[in-house]
Image: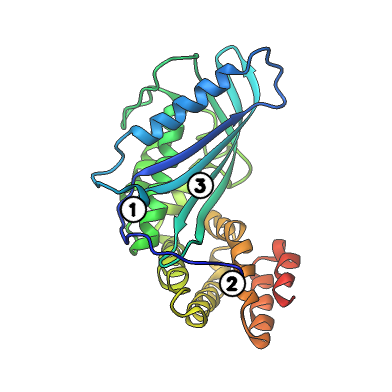
Amino acid sequence: MAAMAFFAPTPSTAQEIKSTVQIVAPRVQLSDKQILITLQNAAQQFINTRKWTDETLNMQEKIEISLFFDITAMNNNDFSGTLQFQIIRPTYNATYKTTIFQFNDEDISFSYREFENLEYQENANVSDFTALLAYYVNIALGMDFDSFGEMAGSPYFSKAQSLVGIMSNVVGWRQGDGKGIRNRYYLSENLTNARFKELRLLTYNYHRKGMDQFSENPDLARKTITDLLKKLKESQSLLQNCLLQKSFFSTKWPELVEIYKGATVPEKAVIVKLLTEMDPTNSQRYEKIKG
């Protein structure tokens, strides 16, 4: 795997959050942008200091997430815009960190008064903003748990799905919001739908049996990932409109390119053909593997 070094974090499926929150509004005319800084700090503190699981973790075990808000409109205390969300995970015996999942949420809206306390109750909507943060925290916990154990993230995906139900009358949470199937409704639906179990298992097999093995045996790790992709290709016709499959490739294409740069010439030919067929959007990027 070209240009990737490795280190050894403490193995654990335990989850708590180490978040980085950024909130910007470059297209909004503001005389004082201090409210954005206040909101950013409050959001980061809300996520990082709240107890989200029953686990006790060391600092190196915490899951890293980033949330980048681009506010495109503000009206008094009402904010709207987009969110780029990312989950990062260490790999065993490596300095390299892999992005488990990234997602662009195109339909963010919430209310916030500067310096107000960020309140949250798990089974009620007391704040559109904290419900949004809690949704993505639970997605992160579920994804990271899934990467360490088969279907281990289910309790957290159920919590995210419950939030969709609680927020069903709020803009951004409904089935028809956002861009097509790329929204919170379909994300949690896919993650709790037994039909897409294979993609949940892919999260575990790719990371635990593939990425975590690169330091000891890169050729075997690469073969494992190739076999997983071939298996996914066999069922692709059943998953064509699945958000999880689309998100897998939009997240993983840069990593896949680096993984296969270290393959043999015959392996490169096979994998470029396979990846291009499965993910035509990034076909030109996969050509870099051959170089």
Mark nearer the N terminus (3 vs 2): 3
| Image spot of residue 75 (x, y percent) | 62, 14
Residue 19 can be seen in this image: yes
The Cα–Cα distance between marks 3 and 2, rounded to whole angstroms, is 30 Å
- Residue at 69% x, 82% y is 269
Mark pair 3, 1: CA separation: 16 Å
Q: Above or below — where is 219 with respect to 29? A: below
Tell me the kind of residue under disc 1: Ser
Q: Which sits earlier in the primary sequence, circle 3 or circle 1?
A: 1
In terms of secondary structure, where does tag 3 sit?
helix
**Res 232 label:** none
Q: Check disc 2 and give the amino acid type.
A: Ile
Q: Which residue is mark 1?
A: 154
Residue beneath label 2, please? 259
Q: Report which residue position mark 3 lands on.
A: 186
Disc 3 residue type (three-letter):
Tyr
Residue 83, image x, y percentages: 58, 37
- Colour scheme shown: rainbow
Viewer-nearest of labels 3 and 1? 1
Q: How many marks?
A: 3
- Callout 1: SS: helix
